[in-house]
């Protein structure tokens, strides 16, 4: 009786090493990536003794970035998969503890989603670098996921929740659309901290290939007010065409977003645009703008290019 075994080209070397192990009982490779490949082959063909030996060897061998990412994706049928995944996370966190450095950027662009999630989950670069982390995440997503819908799904579900500045202010982001709607949330504590002359800035969001951000300000002079401004990043030069801006706020009475401010501009100016709310009405204990001590804002931006 004959049986046919089909293996992919990428599995060929690992399969030969597995055959060698079956007939000799010896596992000779010491290169981490090849050992992971042999482990996967042994799991595929249910060679338990080889699975055990490969797992033990991987624990003792120094990891590489590629082998660490492979260990994160091991099937749950491998008993040592959780231990190897934890070791891989520690390795990646240590290797890329300063992952914003220029020297790591090309290397990181080639790391898979599971690896990037592990790095972001274990490293906290500090408030001063949060926007740089956000920019890094966007660049990585653009590199790995050219399809906008797939990219947006990955960003929303897996990556942006790991960026502190996004967790603190941004609820949803649409990227590189001719028009976009972005929701922001500020706590009462964040708003109170703006008085008498503070400000807070959202992570950037993108519309029609141009970057924008929302900033909130507290001003005591010449009159006490809470200000909201939409500003354009200096990334791709002035916008040639019409830009429609709108800010909405959710109120306690309706629990729906209501119109707060609207502006259309046809200039190429980088001037920040927005509105002011008297400070007492925004921060009062019975303020209609806070729902469970949260201020919910919605920003609309639409770019219509010149014909």
Image: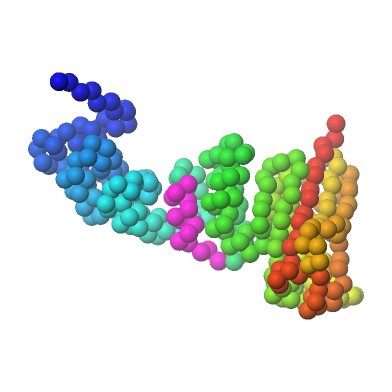
Magenta span contains residue 122: yes
Identify the residue at the far front of this view.
254
- Residue lying at 76% horizontally and 70% vertically, measured from the top left: 290
Q: Quadrant of the N terminus?
A: top left
Residue 70: % across, % down: 36, 45
Q: Which residues are magenta?
A: 113-126
Q: Main secondary structure of the magenta part?
A: helix
| Residue 298 lies in quadrant | bottom right
- Residue lying at 19% horizontally and 40% vertically, measured from the top left: 47
Say which of 3 and 205 sits in front: 3
Is residue 38 among the parts visible in the rendering? no
Q: Quadrant of the C terminus?
A: top right
Judged left or right of residue 175, residue 96 is left
Identify the residue at the far left of this view.
24
Say which of 241 and 51 sits in front: 51
Magenta span contains residue 125: yes
- Residue lying at 38% horizontally and 46% vertically, measured from the top left: 73
Judged left or right of residue 284, residue 159 is left
Say which of 212 and 292 sits in front: 292
| On screen, residue 230 above or below 24 | below
Which color scheme is applied? rainbow
Is residue 85 among the parts visible in the rendering? yes
| Residue 134 lies in quadrant | bottom right
Say which of 91 and 39 sits in front: 39
Residue 217: % across, % down: 78, 68
Residue 40: % across, % down: 28, 40
Count of residue discs? 0
Identify the residue at the far top of this view.
1
- Residue lying at 67% horizontally and 62% vertically, measured from the top left: 169
């Amino acid at each position: 009786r004959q049986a046919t075994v089909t293996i992919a080209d990428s599995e060929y070397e690992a399969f030969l090493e597995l055959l060698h192990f079956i007939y000799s009982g010896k596992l000779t490779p010491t290169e981490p990536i090849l050992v992971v490949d042999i482990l996967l082959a042994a799991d595929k063909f249910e060679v338990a003794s080889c699975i055990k030996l490969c797992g033990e060897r991987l624990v003792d061998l120094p990891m590489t970035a590629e082998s660490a990412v492979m260990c994160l994706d091991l099937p749950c049928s491998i008993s040592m998969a959780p231990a190897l995944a934890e070791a891989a996370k520690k390795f990646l966190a240590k290797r890329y503890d300063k992952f914003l450095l220029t020297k790591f950027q090309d290397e990181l662009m080639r790391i898979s989603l599971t690896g990037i999630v592990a790095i972001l989950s274990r490293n906290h670069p500090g408030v001063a670098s949060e926007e740089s982390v956000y920019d890094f995440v966007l660049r990585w997503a653009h590199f790995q996921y050219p399809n906008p819908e797939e990219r947006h799904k990955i960003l929303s579900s897996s990556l942006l929740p790991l960026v502190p500045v996004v967790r603190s202010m941004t609820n949803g982001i649409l990227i590189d659309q001719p028009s976009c709607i972005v929701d922001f949330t500020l706590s009462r504590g964040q708003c109170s901290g703006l008085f008498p002359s503070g400000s807070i800035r959202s992570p950037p969001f993108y519309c029609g290939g141009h970057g924008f951000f929302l900033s909130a300000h507290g001003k005591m002079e010449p009159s006490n007010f809470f200000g909201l401004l939409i500003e354009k990043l200096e990334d791709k030069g002035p916008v040639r065409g019409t830009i429609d801006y709108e800010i909405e706020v959710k109120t306690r009475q309706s629990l729906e977003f209501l119109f707060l401010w609207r502006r259309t501009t046809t200039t190429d100016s980088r001037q920040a645009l927005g509105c002011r709310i008297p400070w007492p009405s925004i921060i009062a204990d019975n303020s209609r703008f806070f729902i469970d001590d949260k201020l919910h804002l919605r920003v609309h931006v639409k770019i219509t290019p010149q014909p």
